[in-house]
């Protein structure tokens, strides 16, 4: 199964501030290990991340590449691998098709992995934008309570994701535990 992960707030710590250096990129405890467990269980992993800090001039693609190299190095040390990282470098006002909640990043992943569809994949995120993008491509949306997840959970009570039930977990590790246990995901709405 393909598992698509948002990055900031799902894999790495995120408090709403831009992460502008490789040294400032820190994985959430247990997230790298969770990714490795999913990979070793036969799941494919891809990442879809909005990175408007590039368009805003806070950091360049060289810094972003360094963050991703750090992440993949830590993951490889645990026996895991990411097949593809799609990122949107645009400003929210640029009108691109790749910034979530639009589906361009997911389409990049689908094309890169040569898949006919993303139906049946899982989209794990901490924001409404992640969940909406996943649902639009027929992925199962999963919310984690890390990063912006607690605020997003509150917003789901007021306004559900159209056409989708959302599974909610404390963090990426708890999601991996549930998926790998074989008991299935617990859908809440």
Image (cartoon, rainbow, N blue to C red):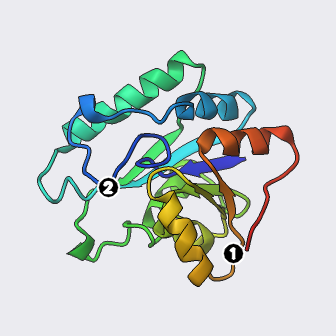
* Relative image position of residue 24 (x, y in whole percent): 27, 34
Extreme residue toward the right, this view? 183
Q: Secondary structure at mark 2?
A: loop
Point 54% across, 45% down: residue: 46
Which quarter of the rendered picture does the C terminus lie within? Answer: bottom right
* Relative image position of residue 4 (x, y in whole percent): 57, 51
Looking at the image, residue 1 lies above or below residue 100:
above
Extreme residue toward the left, this view? 57
Q: How many marks?
A: 2
Q: Give the mark, 1 or 2, whose residue is nearer the N terminus.
A: 2
Query: Looking at the image, can residue 161 be seen?
Result: no
Q: Secondary structure at mark 1?
A: loop
Looking at the image, residue 88 sits to the left or right of residue 54; the answer is: right
Identify residue for label 1: 164
Point 68% across, 46% down: residue: 175
Looking at the image, residue 115 lies above or below residue 158:
above
Of residues 73 and 83, which is closer to you in this image?
A: 73
Q: What distance separates the C-alpha of mark 1 from that of mark 2?
A: 26 Å
Q: Quadrant of residue 154?
A: bottom right
Query: Looking at the image, can residue 152 be seen?
Result: yes
* Relative image position of residue 82 (x, y in whole percent): 53, 35
Extreme residue toward the top, this view? 77
Of residues 160 and 131, which is closer to you in this image?
A: 160
Looking at the image, residue 84 lies above or below residue 124:
above
| Crowd band around label 1 with a 10 angstrom C-alpha radius: few (<14), some (14–19), many (20+) | some
Identify residue for label 2: 16
Looking at the image, residue 12 lies above or below residue 157:
above
* Relative image position of residue 107 (x, y in whole percent): 50, 62
């Amino acid at each position: 199964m393909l598992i698509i992960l948002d990055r900031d707030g799902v894999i790495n710590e995120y408090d709403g501030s831009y992460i502008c250096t490789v040294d400032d990129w820190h994985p959430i405890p247990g997230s790298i290990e969770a990714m490795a467990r999913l990979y070793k269980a036969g799941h494919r992993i891809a990442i879809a991340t909005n990175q408007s800090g590039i368009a805003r001039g806070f950091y360049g693609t060289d810094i972003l590449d360094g963050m991703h190299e750090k992440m993949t190095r830590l993951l490889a040390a645990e026996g895991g691998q990411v097949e593809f990282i799609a990122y949107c470098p645009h400003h929210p006002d640029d009108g691109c098709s790749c910034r979530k909640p639009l589906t361009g990043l997911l389409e990049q992943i689908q094309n890169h992995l040569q898949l006919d569809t993303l139906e049946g994949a899982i989209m794990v995120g901490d924001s409404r934008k992640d969940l909406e993008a996943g649902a639009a491509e027929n992925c199962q949306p999963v919310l984690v309570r890390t990063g912006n997840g607690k605020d997003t959970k509150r917003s789901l009570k007021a306004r559900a994701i159209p056409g989708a039930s959302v599974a909610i977990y404390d963090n990426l590790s708890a999601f991996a535990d549930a998926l790998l246990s074989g008991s299935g995901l617990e859908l809440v709405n």
